[in-house]
Amino acid sequence: MNRKRLSLISGSVLLILVGIIIGQVIFNKLPERVVLYENTQKESPTPVFRQASYLSAEDTRLPSIVDLNEAFVHIAENVNPSVVTITTTKVLKLRGNQMFPGFDDDMFYRFFGVPPQTERRATALGSGVIVDKKGYILTNNHVVEQGEEIMVRLIDNREYKAEIVGTDPKSDLAVIKIKADDLTPIVLGDSDALRIGEWVLAIGSPFSDNLDHTVTAGIVSAKGRSNILDSDIYQSFIQTDAAINPGNSGGALVNIRGELIGINTAIATSGGSGNLGIGFAIPVNLAKKVLSDLIEHGKVIRAWLGVNIQTVDDRTAKAMKIENRNGVLIGGVVKDGPAEKAGIEIGDVIIEFDGEKVKNVSHLQILVSSSEVGKEKEVVIVRGKKLRTIKVKLEEMPGNMAGQSSGTADSTTKLGLTVEELSPNLARQYGVDSDEDGVLVTAVEGDSEAGKAIRAGDLIQRIGDQKIKNLDDYNKALKESAGEYILVLVKRKENTFFVTLKIEE
């Protein structure tokens, strides 16, 4: 009896379990596995990302493409109100009739009543970035320097006439100002902390004002680019592949946090006017000092060393028998300048300034000019293969000395020069001081490599470590340097510079 009751109970339990399973299958289907890459912090003005470099060995997750998409959307929403479109207008006076250019102007005026001088309004387009609620806008100098009337249009289509607060051709930056309310200034970032490969966005008005607030994305391709432009400006550009076109000049280059890290300035072209995937921006850390100086003083106050400098390339390093290919070579020292007072000499190589390794001419120019006038800085130099540390008290750069430097000259494998000892007659003929040391170059073979760097009228004052006072010194130095790269110190008018030559055996 008990066995029969136990079997009945077991059977009942089994039926109940089967019923439950069948009910779950029929009435409660299993959910689909859908992964949503949603930003959980919806109230945050900018999304929060997991940084791959910070992941532990157990956590190999990476930010999703949806995270990146949301970042770009937030940047566009937050930064666009800080970017403006700038239109400059200038009245050009044109001589002569434009309809029939072959006609005599006075005859054309008598017959047709058209004055020989006409006017045409020329306009130029650029961009700018609002940096203060008071209406200060940072842009490129080349955007506003030729404009007689400057108009600024905001993202909400409000338009204002702007006045120039200050311009700085040496950095190609300018500050203008408008009188407006409810402005959205941009957040300034740290361009020194920018890393190659970081995502960046460029915002501006390419080609025409109806394309204002165009947003393009790319990465930081390189930093510290110099010798990009032919003009004599300080160059340490951020290179990016974010599309930059004419009209983007003066616009914002921002990082993934929406911070301003550069002012878009130039593009690489092959003769056309379109983007080729290489754009250049002025680092915001360079712009910060220019911005504050222009607002406070109406001009940029720069420190200087008082030297002519040139880059140390491989041939120069071989000539000097030094291992370091970085740094700059002193080709001239300005009389009574800070460098001369501190004991810096022609032929010294500056490899470090204020604790930072010097890369090239542009790098040192920016390091010095960004320093505070009157401050004492430590300069590490190489002199005679030995390191020396010299303290230099920086002074304010005179206006006529701004940006003065000499580039690296071309070198030769033979001299191809005719030189003579300096005489009063030759001094008068070539316009040099007869009391100067050195031998005078009176002829240069046009097809020689020396002819690319040295010209008639130059004074050769030093070859290698030997000072040249006469022809004997000159010939002796050449003989001792046969088969070697040598540095030749040349004086041309008021400037001195080095040329690297290879003397044939």
Image (tube, rainbow, N blue to C red):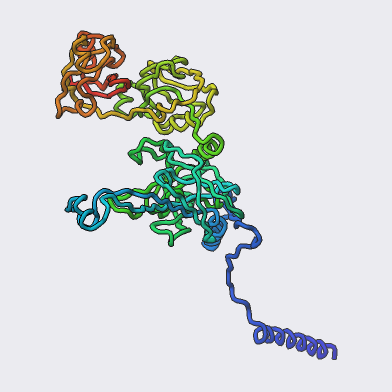
Observer-nearest residue: 413 or 247? 247
Observer-nearest residue: 165 or 16? 165
User: Which picture quadrant has residue 17?
Assistant: bottom right
User: Which picture quadrant has residue 461?
Assistant: top left
Observer-nearest residue: 143 or 322? 143
Spot occupied by residue 149 in the image (x, y as percentages of width and height) = 44, 49
Spot occupied by residue 9 in the image (x, y as percentages of width and height) = 80, 87
Left or right, 128 with respect to 33, comes to left
Q: Residue at x 49, y 43 (%)?
A: 164
Q: Residue at x 40, y 16 (%)?
A: 335
Spot occupied by residue 419 in the image (x, y as percentages of width and height) = 18, 16
Image label count: 0
**Residue 334 higher or lower than 109, as above or below:** above
Left or right, 27 with respect to 158, comes to right
Q: Residue at x 33, y 55 (%)?
A: 274
User: Which picture quadrant has residue 327?
Assistant: top left
Give the quadrant of the N terminus.
Answer: bottom right
Mark yes or no: residue 62 visible. Answer: no
Give the quadrant of the C terminus.
Answer: top left
Observer-nearest residue: 404 or 219? 404
